[in-house]
Image (spheres, helix red, strand yellow):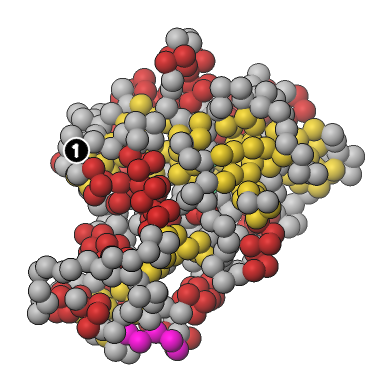
Amino acid sequence: HALTRLGVEKGDRVATLAWNGYRHFELYFAISGIGAVCHTINPRLFHDQLTYIVNHAEDKYIFVDLTFVPLLEGLAADLPKVKGYVVMTDAVHMPTSSLPNLLCYEDLLAPEAEVYDWPLFDELTASSLCYTSGTTGEPKGSLYSHRSTVLHSFSVSTGEALACSSSDTLLPVVPMFHVNAWGMPYACAMNGVKLVLPGADYSGAALYELIEGEGVTKAAGVPTIWFMLLEYLRNEGKTFSRLNTVVAGGAAVPRSMIEAFQNEHGVDVYHAWGMTETSPVGTTGRLSAADKRLSKEEQVSIKCKQGRAVYGLDMKIVDDDGQELPRDGKAFGELMVRGPWVIGAYFENQAATAAAIEDGWFRTGDVARLDSAGHMQIVDRSKDLIKSGGEWISSIDLENLAVGHPEVAEAAAVGMPHPHWGERPLLVVVAAEGASPTREGMLAYLADKVAKIWMPDDVIFMDELPHTATGKISKLQLREKLADYRLPTA
Ligand code: AMP
């Protein structure tokens, strides 16, 4: 009712700039349910990217959490098409702000009726819009339809994916401003799952308190979050009373993390792989009955892979000429996907569409292996693979081994120029709090874990690594920081 009174019509884009909270959840359903498009904005993007996407999407209104009001104040002058800003709070907490046409969420809703006759419309009507973080070039929009969203929610609900049941309590730590929080708000509503929304505090202490206080049984998010939680549990000597499952995706989960959750806390960790363009869930890493007959070691090795495709999604790997490669667990090439919730085009962007879609398949930009049982394993982002002589070295594998070292908080491997080999790996390490790992110690730790040719030519230390808006290590910015660095072997 309130949106209609504001003049929002079918097909209009209405943006949100908000944490995971109940008003954001209400907006997901209200905006899409009246036939408008819920455009979730990632507040971690840079100023120019934010103005680009609001203008490209032609957002009519922006609903904004109190925390992000100052961010918008700095942008508003460059957003001529936005008709007004609704602060997601009540009258008592309304800020004084320079934002034009400022409205209060609860005041807007207060006079409206409690029931609404939901309209019926074509299932191909757009429901939500999400832009990729755009590590290169402008951010690109993925527009989801009601059809793709409902089918994706069914898929996320299945036993192979999140196994959503009304007896569960689920904590999506993955933000609702990034690929619809992996579809969990929809899948939970669909199955009557209690949903716990963490707001802005992702610290180990805050998440632990929520998990215990709300009886969370399942949680989902990126590995970085789980590192912080594990560290908190270790420091405080605590464990969980009800949490049994952690689904991790967005980046590869290191073996050491899977083992720590399993052995120290009895929590099952498995992968989900996907991307903005795939709604996002494409594969999940639940063990099959056959997998469970293997040794514990082998089971963990399978869990280190990204899992099997969920029903509805097709995958293949191809070489540089587009020829399909065998599913033998050895060959690797670019991962291509297609399915009902994979984009067929970028929103209003023909050039990006032409580069990404080939014969109905979407080029993921990920390099992967497929085995005969259907397990997919991400080797690297294609642009991050390190090419040394004729050999490809996976930066992800090196990083995941390095973070298994108890004195390491985070690590990044990058290919640095080398006159003889083309590229050789450099390992950049962030020390764990209070620890002081050494170059020699790191090399000795890796020596019996990787082939000689994979051994980094150097290890250097940084106080922190640059991250992208979606929390991944930004190799682009890291390479910029390393512009003057030369390998000692070069
Ligand atoms: P985004 O569109 O920002 O969600 O990023 C998608 C990218 O994140 C994928 O193309 C992968 O490179 C990476 N990614 C997502 N899930 C995983 C995973 N489980 N393991 C490794 N990389 C992942």
Q: Is residue 326 visible?
A: yes
Report whether 293 appears left or right of 187. right
483 in relation to 257, above or below: below
Residue 236 highlighted magenta (yes or no): no
Residue, disc 1: 166
Task: Identify which residue, 206 or 436, lies in the foreground.
Answer: 206
Q: Position of residue 298 (x, y in %)?
A: 51, 15
Q: Position of residue 167 (x, y in %)?
A: 18, 34
Report whether 169 appears left or right of 280. left
Residue 209 lies in quadrant:
top left
Quarter of the figure with the N terminus = bottom left
* Secondary structure mostly seen in the magenta stretch: loop
Residue at horizontal 45 percent and vertical 10 percent from the top:
293
Report whether 488 appears left or right of 202. right
Residue at horizontal 63 percent and vertical 44 percent from the top:
336
Element class at badge 1: loop
Residue at horizontal 46 percent and vertical 36 percent from the top:
310
Residue 334 lies in quadrant:
top right
**Residue type, label 1:** Ser
- The stretch in magenta equals 80-84
Task: Identify which residue, 244 or 111, lies in the foreground.
Answer: 111
Counting other residues with Cα less than 10 Å from the Cα at mark 1, is it few (<14), some (14-19), or many (20 or more)? Answer: some
Q: Position of residue 59 (x, y in %)?
A: 41, 78
Q: Is residue 209 visible?
A: no
190 in relation to 6, above or below: above
Residue 370 lies in quadrant:
top right
Residue at horizontal 19 percent and vertical 38 percent from the top:
166
